[in-house]
Image (spheres, rainbow, N blue to C red):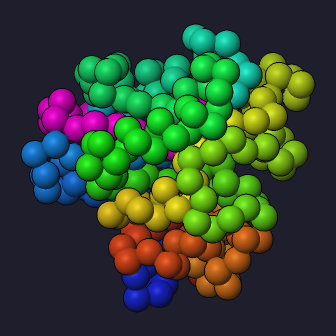
Amino acid sequence: MLRGTAAVSVQRLAPEDLGPAAADCVFEALAARPKPVIGVATGSSPSPLYQALAASPRDFGSATWFALDEYVGLPQGHPESYAEVLRREIIEPLGLDPRTVHLPNPHTGDHQAACARYEQQIAEAGGIDLQILGIGRNGHLAFNEPGGALDSCTRLETLTEDTRSANQRFFDSPEDVPTHCLTQGLGTILAARHLLLIAQGAGKAEALRAALKGPVSRDCPASVLQLHSRVTVLADAEAASLL
C-alpha cells in the first residue's frame, strides 16, 4: 500500500487485480443506497473493471449511470462515440436498461444548453455516489485539459493535440479524431461522493505523480484529486512507479 494525502488511498496492484479491486468499490456503492448513481469513464483504464463487473452475477438494475464525456462531431451510432463504447462495454454486458445510462448530448445544436441539462440530470438523480476515472498522459481528468478552471461545470472543451494523438489508435486516421467534446467539469467531478481512479502503464506514471504529489494547479487538472475527501487510486506497478 502506498500512501498519498490523508484523503487519497493509493493501492499498487498486479494488473490482473485492478479489475476485481475496482469492482469491489462499485459493489460497495451499489449496496450503500437503494438507487445508487455511478459515474462511468471510457478508455483502456476502466476496461478491466467493466470485465470484472460483467463476470459478476450481480444485478445492476437499481443504478443510474452517467458518462464523463462525449465527442462532438461524430454522427450518432459512430462506433467510437462514447455512447457506442458504453453500449458495448457496460450496457449489453451488464444487462442495463439503456435509459438508465446518460451521456452529455452533442447533437442538439446548443452545447451550452446540453451541458446545463446534463448538470441538471445529475442533480435530479441525487448526485454521483462513485465516479470512475482514468487519467490522461498530460494530466487531464475526463476531458478537462490543462489550463482550465478547477471548479468548472460540464462544458464544451477543445481537445489538445496530445489527447487527440493518444486517441488516434481508435480511429482510421489522425484527421478522424474529433477536436471537441462535451465533458463533465472538474467541479462536477469533485461533487461526487467517492472518486475511483484507475491507472495502468508507464505512460501514466508522470501524470499520476503530478496529480498526487505535485501542487494543485491548472497545469495538471487531475491534481484536484487532492482537494477531495475520498479518493481511491488503483494503479499497476508501472503507473505507480514515481509515487
Q: Nearer the viewer, residue 136 or 45?
A: 136
Viewer-side residue, 190 vs 109: 109
Residue pictured at 30% horizontal, 32% vertical: 54
Q: 4 above or below 55?
A: below
State the image coordinates of residue 187 (x, y, percent, origin top left): 53, 62
Above-or-below relation of 241 to 23: below
User: Residue 89, image x and y in percent?
Assistant: 44, 28
Residue 11 falls left or right of residue 42: left
Compared with 187, 59 (above or below) is: above
From where the camera sits, is residue 225 visible?
A: yes
Residue 206 visible in image: no
Region of the chain picked out in magenta, as a range: 55-71
Residue 40 belongs to the span the image colors magenta:
no
Above or below, 229 against 79 in this view is below
Which residue is found at the position 46% from the left and 27% from the top?
86
Q: Is residue 56 magenta?
A: yes
- Which quadrant is home to the C terminus? bottom right
Left or right of 145 on screen, residue 122: left
Where does the N terminus fall, quadrant-wise? bottom left
Horizontal side, residue 219 vs residue 95: left or right: right
Residue 239 lies, in percent from the top left, at: 61, 66
- Nearer to the camera, 96 or 238: 96
Residue 126: % across, % down: 26, 49
Identified at 62% across, 19% down, the residue is: 107
